Image: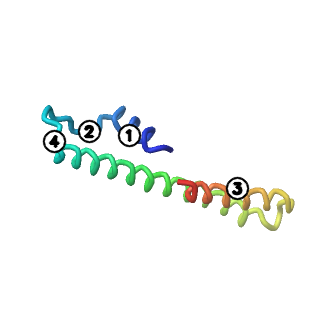
């Protein structure tokens, strides 16, 4: 997700960035800090969700390792790795 996408989603659920008439530097600083906090929070939530998804793949690998075809186990293992790698891209 890009910063713009995250901020657009935040605004769509009721977050808003402060907008004062005078437009002074304090207002700009508050807006920047709010945007950064929203952005960081979204990345934390995404990281937790990625790990939960990857963990499900890991569980499938462990649960079915003895019974499953090697390609199936390898595919689930690679899927878990790919999900975790998405966090490296942000």
In this rendering, would 72 be left or right of 22?
right
Earlier sequence position, callout 4 versus callout 2? 2
Q: Is residue 63 above or below residue 4?
A: below
Q: Which residue is mark 4?
A: 24
Distance between mark 3 and mark 1 Cα atoms: 29 Å
Element type at mark 1:
helix
The local crowd at label 2, few if under 14, some if 14 to 19, many if 20 or more residues have their Cα within 10 Å, is some
Q: Residue 57, how many percent across, how many down?
A: 67, 58
Tag 1 near tag 4, CB within 8 Å: no
Closer mark to the observer between disc 3 and disc 1: 1
Tag 1 near tag 2, CB within 8 Å: yes
In this rendering, would 75 be left or right of 32?
right
Q: Residue 10, how many percent across, how many down?
A: 36, 39
- Residue 64 or 32: which is nearer the viewer? 32
Element type at mark 4:
loop
| Circle on res. 7 | 1
Which corner quadrant of the image does residue 73 belong to? bottom right
Q: At 23% from the left edge and 44% from the top edge, which residue is drawn?
A: 28
Element type at mark 3:
helix
Closer mark to the observer between disc 3 and disc 2: 2
Q: Which residue is mark 2?
A: 17
Earlier sequence position, callout 1 versus callout 2? 1
Tag 3 near tag 1, CB within 8 Å: no
Closer mark to the observer between disc 4 and disc 2: 4
């Amino acid at each position: 997700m890009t910063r713009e996408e995250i901020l657009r989603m935040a605004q769509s659920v009721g977050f808003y960035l402060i907008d004062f008439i005078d437009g002074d530097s304090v207002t700009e600083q508050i807006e920047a800090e709010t945007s950064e906090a929203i952005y960081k929070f979204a990345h934390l939530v995404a990281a937790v969700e990625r790990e939960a998804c990857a963990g499900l793949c890991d569980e499938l690998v462990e649960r079915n390792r003895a019974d499953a075809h090697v390609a199936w186990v390898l595919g689930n293992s690679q899927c878990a790795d790919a999900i975790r790698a998405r966090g490296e891209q942000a």
